[in-house]
Amino acid sequence: MAALVVGHKNPDTDTIVSAIAVADLMSKRGVEAKAVAQGPAVPETLFVLDKFGLSQPEVVSGVAGQKVILVDHSDLAQAPADLKDAEVIAIVDHHKLGDVTTSSPLLMWVWPAGCTGTVIKAMYDFYGIEIPKNIAGGLLCAILSDTVIFKSPTTTEDDKKAVEALAKIAGVSDVQALGMEMFKVKSAVDGVPAKELVFRDYKDFDMNGKKVGIGQLEMIDISMLDKVKGDLAAEIAAVKADGRHSVFLLLTDIMKEGSEMLICSEDAGIVEKAFGVKGDKSVWLPKVMSRKKDVVPKFEAAFKG
């Protein structure tokens, strides 16, 4: 039975492409593996899969009784609900180490990079396995997406080197143009329900015993969201009402290099505690581009304090 390679809930481009790439890599190393996902691909990811001829992974509702490889996460809150009834045999990630535990030794590749795709490029190199052209294109796009075309503070030199090498393999001559093409697809929100936008890139976190949700929409120009901000605010209020202490939605403007944060919390003062600025319903946070590096650590510290 093939091991299931699965990324986090509400999958983004990195999590989908990482599953595809790791399934390919592990299978070529003699460990039969299959890419799956915890939800359907979002528009940006569909654009990438179509552009490079990659198949969308099957959506699964559970992994009980299976061998599992986790990509792009190691937090139980983002993993399949029945992960405790599966055997985790590997983790490939670029976030902080989460709360997943195992009863047996496992393969671990967890790097402080801007994207899991960068880690996977290094894995292919380490094991001496050639990266297929279509997977190289997918990994390239995943890195451009996660690093916001190198504008994110999470960007490392490893990410830039990986992009340069992957572009050559994939036959991409202008990575900036490709990145902007992706973000134009990502910025298209006309007619998209508010719920879908909130959960397009959304994660739950346990912060000192409190359940906190943080979503993010990355736009070329966040004024494109002006007509739907009221709907987005109403939607995060509904999400909060479902057993959460707080829900925050980052509206990130990749050209202005900052984010407006929509706030719905039992204690709006937590925002001032974390960022030093007062905000009731929303607040502008200059230079805040990354949920992983700019937002989550500050909130975690604020909730502990």
Image: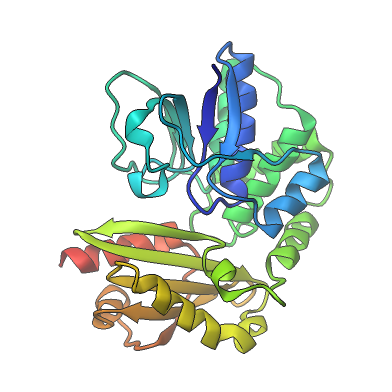
Q: Tell me: residue 235, above or below residue 90.
A: below
Going 37% across and 21% down the picture, which residue do you hit?
A: 106
- The image quadrant that residue 241 belongs to is bottom left
**Residue 284 shown left or right of residue 101 in the figure:** right
The C terminus sits in image quarter: bottom left
**Residue 107 shown left or right of residue 289 in the figure:** left
Count of picture labels = 0
**Residue 181 shown left or right of residue 216 in the figure:** right
Q: How is the image coloured?
A: rainbow
Instruction: Give residue 156's position: percent from left, percent from top.
Output: 52, 48
Q: Tell me: residue 237, above or below residue 33.
A: below
Q: Tell me: residue 253, above or below residue 210.
A: below
**Can residue 124 be seen from the camera position used here?**
no
Going 80% across and 37% down the picture, which residue do you hit?
A: 170
Going 35% across and 45% down the picture, which residue do you hit?
A: 75
The N terminus sits in image quarter: top right
Going 70% across and 57% down the picture, which residue do you hit?
A: 44
**Residue 5 shown left or right of residue 280 in the figure:** right
Q: Nearer the viewer, residue 92 or 215?
A: 215
**Can residue 136 be seen from the camera position used here?**
yes
Instruction: Give residue 294's position: percent from left, percent from top.
Output: 41, 64
- The image quadrant that residue 52 belongs to is top right
Q: Nearer the viewer, residue 74 or 63?
A: 63
Instruction: Give residue 252's position: percent from left, percent from top.
Output: 55, 72
Instruction: Give residue 70's position: percent from left, percent from top.
Output: 46, 34
Q: Which residue occupies the extreme left position in the image?
A: 305
